[in-house]
Amino acid sequence: MDHAAAIATLYREEYGRILPTLIRVLGDFALAEDALQEAFCAAVEQWPRDGLPPVPRAWIIRVARYRAIDRIRRGDRLEQKLALLEPAIEGLSASLERPAVIADDQLRLLYTCCHPSLALDAQVALTLRTLCGLTTEQIARAYLVPAATMAQRIVRAQRKIRDAAIPYEVPEAADLRERTEAVLTCIYLMFNEGYSATGGDALLRVDLCEEAIRLGRMVVTLLAAAPRAEALALLSLMVMHHSRRFARIAVDGGVVLLDQQDRSLWRRDEAEEGVALLHEALRLGAHGRYATQAAIAALHLQASAPSETDWAQIVGLYDRLMALAPSPIVALNRAAALAMAEGAERGLAQIDELASSGALRGYHLLPASRADLLRRLGRFAEAAAAYREALPLTRNDAERRFLEARLGEVSGRGG
């Protein structure tokens, strides 16, 4: 039995479910996270030797509980603190057997992490770390900052929640609006990590995508008026993207680009739900970045073949997105759309301009996108050089295999 794979799967599926309840019980982010991390470390050490436990999840919960108690006993005022917490800790396993408790705790954690007293980037980073179980390095790559910088943000945010005694609760309706932007950003980045994993063997993490969609649905039910419109727009965007999941991965686990996907594998029921959610969001007045991205996704889904895609309209929507939420990554996506609408030369010029700015230095999709356009233009030697530049920048094995295959193609044609 592959114990390492079993532990990795359990970590992906359960970390973000167990940790919120541990935090509620212990009242301390660092203590809860340390206890859970120690439980998984113990699994790495013991399971290959002793065998997989009958119920791995229960084993992790039990060990995390013991580790938390041990840490409390080693701390200050241990007897008083332990007397208060031990009954709750003993009931941890029972709490985690009730789905409603798990959902409530995750929602509480989401809104606690998104308290307005924290900076927006700290809110999102802390949520991705605690609720999603992403590593500090993965979050840093999403933000294009050094891992050490991101680690400092997360630690400062945890300390501020502790020192300011920020309540672990979903806020009242009147206070929901001010936290909406951060909450939606967290869910959006969670989905993005699942949709295109920054590391590991697989391109797609279905569990993370589905968790983001589930949280998105929960948030929609909490909100009213304008915030609800934007939440609906985000939910529609995620559902539409997720509808294409079976076509994005080849049988061997390789990457399948949009123009090569078998569109009969797209989940039409989910695509139709996503479009309906977008229409409802627009009816309620959604006009922000999520609605704009959802409109782009809808145009892709409505095209029965790549040649029928309305690339000119997509470029126009990216222009709108650049006005609403300008970023180098949006500019890169716009350049790719421009290449499809007006020719590879036009898109390449935009990418070269973006590369010269240095804004996406170290981001593998910049040289990878440039390589693809050079390949389409028949400039194979330059394409090979760009693929070689992209390869060491990706941490995802599926993407690496795709880039290596493309490098082999262009190298055999003059690279």
Image (spheres, rainbow, N blue to C red):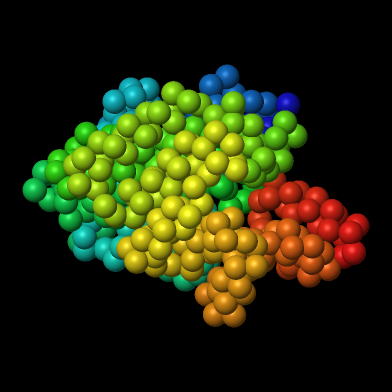
Q: Is residue 394 above or below residue 397?
A: below
Residue 254 shown left or right of residue 220 in the figure: right
Residues 267 and 164: in front is: 267
Residue at position x 48%, y 37% in the image: 301
The one nearer the camera, 57 or 383, is 383
> Residue 359 location in percent, x, y?
52, 75
Residue at the limit of the structure toward the left, as seen here: 174
Q: How far across and how far down the image is residue 312, in percent?
A: 48, 55
Looking at the rendering, in which quadrant would you find the N terminus? top right
Expressed as whole percent of the image width and height from the top left, the position of residue 120 reads 31, 63
Q: Quadrant of the C terminus?
A: bottom right
Is residue 273 among the parts visible in the rendering? yes
- Residue at position x 55%, y 57% in the image: 341
Is 375 positioned to the left or the right of 233 in the image?
right
When asked about the image quadrant of residue 322, the answer is bottom left
Residue at image position (74%, 54%) is: 403
What is the x, y in percent for residue 281?
Answer: 26, 41
**Front in this rendered view, residue 335 or 6:** 335
Q: Is residue 329 visible?
A: no
Image height check: is 121 above or below 181? below
Picture quadrant of residue 2:
top right
Which residue is drawn at the image coordinates 70% and 59% (left, top)?
A: 372
How many numbered tags mark residues here? 0
